[in-house]
Image (spheres, rainbow, N blue to C red):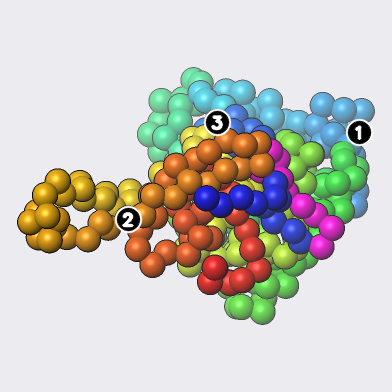
Amino acid sequence: MIRWRNIVRIQGVRMITTTQAQAMRSTVKPYDMHVLVASGPSCSWPSKIYGGEREDTYVANVVKVSENITGKVKVSGYDGGPLPQLQARDIVCFPAQTVYRNVQQHETEEVLRHAAAASSLEYAGSSDAQPSLPCGVTVETAATSILVCTHGSRDERCGQCGTGLYTALEAVRRKQTLPNVTVYATTHVGGHEYAANAIVYGGPCDGDWFGLLTDADAEKLLHIATGSCERRDLAEHWRGSAKWTALPPPPPLLQSQPEPTTPSSRAAAPRPSGVAVTVVDAQGQAHHVEAPPRISILALSRLNFDKFYLEGACGAQC
């Protein structure tokens, strides 16, 4: 029987308890489309990018136009640097993984109609299977994208924790030369209390949300985005997804053979393929799982992330 303290991960002064990890699950309401709008440097963002006294009128217009799309649409701003004088901006749409360049405010309706069709969504009043785009707008395929909320004027936690994570992600991305990954610093996405928050689109991810991240998680998050790690490697940070609220189940464990009833059958029977393990969490609840042969305790916890969490500093050797 295994017992452990109610701490999942310690990174500097941050501790994630089992209760916190479980509370983060299913905190993402499913949605159908996410639209990012270049909104100038993050230091200039008001507390509300739209719907407030100092709202960005361009973003507010995108929000209004998005109401014509059948389905739930999220709209966020991102730090794209200083805005051009003519106010033509870039718009990025997920899950279509499409970047629209040089979009004037009066052209946003045509762009979102095109993006809705690319995402298999309907746009009110449009019957075109492949809507056309304004002449000056160019289209590119977006790289695998990581969105990090750095909206400090909305919540200080996002400004501090989010900016730290964004900076670390960019440093690791450049060091490991990952040109097919783009990291965006974004406005509020929801869940200040889970800062730093990150959303991953593309690669093996379908709008996966992660919370309570620190800069120490940057490398693993990039590996998840590129497919060299699985989502469950940050399972204790996983908040949910755009399309579903539960991680895919882990591979089924091998089943033990039934216990032989006679000496002769016992001799001929193969060895059991698994070992019964009982884990008792900090609340005293027992979790009964089966461990495959030659698996470490940490690896077993990852296979059963939906039941209990365990972290250590032994390199998964214990």
- Residue 30, which numbered label? 3
Q: Is residue 245 magenta?
A: no
What residue range appears in magenta? Answer: 12-21
Where is 77 relative to 213, above or below? Answer: above
Pick whichever of labels 3 and 2 is earlier in the sequence: 3
| Image location of residue 210, percent across then percent down | 64, 48
Are the residues flagged by discs 1 and 3 in contact, CB closer than 8 Å?
no
Tell me where residue 317 appears, x and y as whole percent. 53, 71
| Mark 1 secondary-structure assignment | loop
Disc 1 or 3, which lies upstream in sequence? 3
- The CA span between labels 1 and 3 is 29 Å
Q: Toward which corner of the image does residue 263 lie, by quadrant? A: bottom left
Q: Is residue 199 left or right of 122 when viewed as pictured?
A: right
Q: Nearer the viewer, mark 1 or mark 3?
A: 3
Question: Which residue lies at the image location 53% right of the left edge and 46% below the top edge?
Answer: 279
Q: Rounded to the nearest whole Å, what is the CA distance between mark 2 and mark 1?
A: 61 Å
Mark 2: amino acid: Gly
Q: Residues within 10 Å of mark 1 (few under 14, many from 20)?
A: few
Tell me the amino acid under the disc marked 1. Answer: Arg
Query: Which residue, given by chain and number where applicable, does mark 1 sit on?
Result: 54
Q: Residue at x 38, y 34 (%)?
A: 129
Relative image position of residue 305 (x, y in whole percent) = 52, 47
SS at mark 2?
Answer: loop
Question: Residue at image x 76%, y 31%?
Answer: 60
Residue 146: in sight, yes or no? yes
Q: Which residue is mark 2?
A: 274
The residue closer to the viewer here, 292 or 165, is: 292
- Nearest the camera: 30 or 33? 30
